[in-house]
Amino acid sequence: MTTKATAPAPLELPGWAFLELAHGKASPAVVSALWDGEWSRRLVMLRAFDTVTSAAPDLLGPLPAAGAAWQALENAQAAAPAEIRALILHPQVGSWLAYALRRDRKGVDSTAPAYIDFGQFNTLALAAAARAGQPFTTKVPMREGRVLIPRLGMARFPGAPVWDVAEAGTEDGRIWLRHDGRQIDVPADGADGAGWWGLREVSVGESPALTVWLDDIDPMRDLADPVAPARLSEPELARWTELLAGAWRILTRDHADVAAALAAGVTSLVPLPSGDGWETRSASTGEAFGAILCSPPPDAETLAVSLAHEQMHILLGGLMHLLPLTETAGVPSLYAPWRDDPRPAGGLLQGVYAFFGIAAFWRRQRHGNKLHDFEYAYARAQTTEALGIIRDAGGLTAHGMAFTDGLSEEIASWRSDDIDEEAAALAALVADGHRAGWRIRNCRPSPADIAVLAGLWDKDIAFHIGESDVLPDPAMRHWSWGRLGLARRRLSAPDRFHDTLTEDWAAGLTDADLALFAGDAELAVKGFAEQLIADPDSADAWTGMGLALSLAAPGAASRVLLERPEVVLAVHRRLLEYPAARDLADWVGATTASGRRRS
């Protein structure tokens, strides 16, 4: 290869590698094949970048034309191919390339001059020349007084204009940068120095070891737009290292195959800020193959499952760069049991694979722990349901059907696993509640059907109501964490269960929820009925009523409140006089099912 002059060779994934991935597995050899695919993709993106900057050289503003940087990159590639491959495959280089190409297509909203984003190519060439020990001088863009050198670190010139240019060059493999009379010499070992933050590398364990860049500085380390650095303090760095070491011990001990794939496939860990919620947040993006983003976890086990989860996203992202698994990106209309909003087919498939990984993690990690049994039962149920949804929805390619065939076969083999009864019951309760909560918030029945149904109120006449439309609400906030947290509290700390309502994360939960998850379904029915008198539009009260009735008095009312709660709510809003919630649900359930009310 040469980065510019030679077209990347087409790459096909071996059949054995596809079969491994389709069964939720990935040996280091599979991961290596995916890295080869990413290498080809990066070269395609670099060629596209060259086309853009050649056609519009003004994108580089005060920076030199791209030709010299291209030459430096190709010279470095010829002298040190392995080093330059690692540099170009650095996850954040992929994010930057994707961002620049989106900007060219007006796909981003940026206030930065174009040369700030497109000129980052010069820093890539600078890093390449240094790694090859070759001389190179250029000018590089400065973002708020900072210059990021990929896979190396960040130079800082305090007091510089928001957007500016610095001189830069290499000498004997060392990089220097100069702005307004001040020079920064990058330390030979890449560590911190005067005006310089080194990109810190953390390595834990052995045979295999996990070695990652702990990236708190790269502007392109987030999911989409550039972000400011958030340098970890020494205590924070030590805490992350400790957590990573603990997570790696768990993974290498109990999940050796997952650990082997992580060691081969993950090169960057990006600390996210702590969020408002109580859950650890993690993420990844297909353009940054090999990078995992994660907020500070409370313990090593949480980090371990987060790594296993995001690794599945990374693997599937790499596969989908090589093989289309869905016909189109799709529209957000499908139910994902782990999301509060509708998802397109591609997004749902990503979630299926990730939650398969979560279920597989807890399946091995249970060790007789009730909470772990719950996590396994819940993730298994979510994955199984979502597999059925995406296969029934259509839109999968032949490869997509074969892929979900493998996952379905694998997860079906887990059906006979023994699971603690209380954990299984709570998992089913949370799953049913989430599905109903999603429907009542995102589904809208036909107004004409609702008008007819409301006109039949209290009559013994059957009526078939059509399917509801899925209408996503972009402003919707997360709503499902409360009951999930309540189930976890019930199993992990039952002595503190009744103190739950005093805690911040439980905002929105009520005494009726406590009764429901404590097993007092009759008290819960009464509590939710009282809530609906006070607030007839309460989605949580309607779904809570359905859950409570499914335990206390299963029948038409519980069935419709869990399967079509949006219909009950819409009829309730249409009636001039509000009947009792339970009576209405019982009538709607019977009328839309068979036309006969339960006595």
Image (cartoon, grey):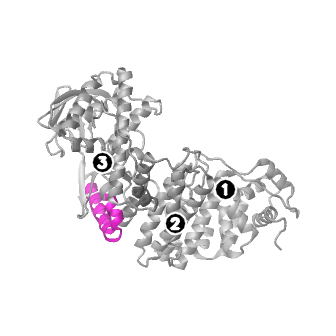
Which of disc 2 and disc 1 is earlier in sequence?
2
Q: Given the image, on which type of amino acid does mark 3 rest?
A: Asp
- Comparing labels 3 and 2, the label whose residue is closer to the camera: 2
* Residue range corresponding to the magenta coloring: 234-262
Choose between 486 and 95: the one closer to the eye. 95
Q: Main secondary structure of the magenta part?
A: helix
Q: Is residue 507 visible?
A: no
Mark 1 or 2, closer to the camera: 2
Label 3: which residue? 215
Answer few, some or many: residues within 10 Å of disc 2's Cα (few below 14, many 20 plus, some between 14 and 19): few
Q: Residue furthest left?
A: 172
Please name the amino acid that badge 1 sits on: Ile
Q: Secondary structure at mark 3?
A: loop
Residue at 35 percent across and 51 percent down: it is 33
Residue under label 2: 409
Labels 3 & 2 near each other (Cβ < 8 A): no
Q: Would residue 239 be counted in the magenta stretch?
A: yes
Element under label 2?
helix
Res 569 seen here: yes
* x then y, percent, for residue 247: 32, 64
CA gap between label 3 and label 2 equals: 38 Å
Question: Residue beneath label 1, please?
Answer: 440
The picture places residue 106, in percent across and down from the top left corner, at 47, 30
Which element is circle 1 on?
Answer: helix
Residue at (22% x, 44% y) in the render: 82
Above or below, comparing residue 232 to residue 262 in the picture: above
Q: Residue 73: percent from the left, percent from the top? A: 24, 33
In contact (CB < 8 Å): disc 1 and disc 2: no
